[in-house]
Image: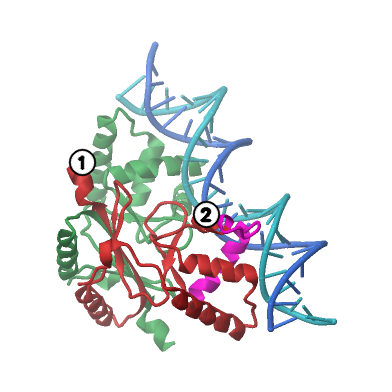
Chain colours: A green, B red, C blue, D cyan
Amino acid sequence: MRTSRKNVPSKLKDQDVDRGIERLRSVLHARSLKLSTVREAIARSALTYSGHFSVEDLLSVLRSKGVSGAHMATVYRALPLLIEAGLIQPTMLSRGTGHFYEVAFEREHHDHLVCKSCGDVIEFHSEAMEALQREIAARYDFSIEEHVHELLGRCKRCRAG
Amino acid sequence: MRTSRKNVPSKLKDQDVDRGIERLRSVLHARSLKLSTVREAIARSALTYSGHFSVEDLLSVLRSKGVSGAHMATVYRALPLLIEAGLIQPTMLSRGTGHFYEVAFEREHHDHLVCKSCGDVIEFHSEAMEALQREIAARYDFSIEEHVHELLGRCKRCRAG
DNA sequence: TTCAGTGCAAAGGATTTGCAACACC
DNA sequence: GGTGTTGCAAATCCTTTGCACTGAA
């Protein structure tokens, strides 16, 4: 089992971000869509976001970067494209309200431990778990395309406090 | 690994439903809340619901039972109490919109395989999976209180079609 | 030049809340 | 009889849509 250093996903390097943008451009082009200035700014902000973010979070970043009047609707319209291009992926589905996303581009698959007390998120990857999932799917003649796996509870610190 | 017969959860027997109601009554009493006629009707409809249901689904059942003007707000207000009493539990979190629930009272824990094509849901339970989760949690000194685990993909029938 | 993209405001859907009337214990 | 509960409608929250205008290829 691997774990990201200090459980905080590392930011993509500039050159990786550029590659992500190229990927996006290519996906958009294939669909006769355009990579506008605003769209690119949204993609860059998402790719460099460290951790899990909501639309609101992304908007804050964009505004702080001075992307004039970054608009909610524009972000909502861009996200599905970023997902399609594999730049980000939805996550943290068990949070009651609102949706969250995280960088997916050139990151390995992982699942989450979520502390219900402090909200801290620990990422983990277990090949044994993945294998077990495949095994179960096979038993039902089911082909898995994706999965949601979150372990909710209390982290060490919150139990101690 | 066990699986429910034909992957459809069996309905609770009348006497089990009654026990569920008693459990609810006791939980409510402990909090100085009341088991009203409407509340009981909601609980019974939930406990006898076969499969996964939304608030809307539950409302339909209530209306068909003639529970006069079963109201949305009332159901929304009752659900958290039913969850607290362990009668039902939220589930199917990966469905985009709206929330779903299922009976939890005296049912063994299970997770779900969800067909993205036909929406069919297969329940499964894997002790190996549970053990692996505990192992991962231990590794991070994390105590698991609950988890969300859904495998999304395509069922045999939909792949064939 | 020609579609696609954007801002804005209004629409939508799901869930929640305020309040007066009502029902349990 | 005093609280908690209900119905109803209005309010919220998050997300989507329609439309006229702007911008990328």
Which span of residues is magenta-colored? B63-85
Q: Nearer the viewer, residue A155 or A50?
A: A155
Q: Is residue A72 above or below residue B74?
A: above
Residue at x-position 40% and y-position 85%: A159
Residue A144 appears at what percent x and percent y?
21, 55
Residue at x-position 47% and y-position 57%: B54
Tell me how far mark 2 sits from mark 1, CA to CA.
31 Å
Residue B74 in the magenta stretch? The answer is yes
Q: Earlier in the sequence, mark 2 or mark 1?
A: 2
Query: Is any atom of residue A71 visible in this view?
Result: no
> Is residue A37 rendered to the left or right of residue C6?
left
Residue B1 in the magenta stretch? The answer is no
* Quadrant of the snapshot with the C terminus of chain B: top left
Q: Is residue A52 above or below residue B96?
A: below
Q: Which mark is residue A129?
A: none
| Residue at image mark 1 | B161
Q: Nearer the viewer, residue A28 or B23?
A: B23
> Mark 2, chain letter?
B
Residue A67 appears at what percent x and percent y?
46, 43
Q: Amino acid at mark 2?
A: Glu
Examine the image and state in which quarter residue A12 appears. Answer: bottom left
> Is residue A146 rendered to the left or right of residue A155?
left
| Residue at image mark 2 | B56
Circle 1: element type: loop
Q: Amino acid at mark 1?
A: Gly
Q: Is disc 2 surrounded by few (<14), some (14 to 19) or many (20+) residues within 10 Å?
A: some
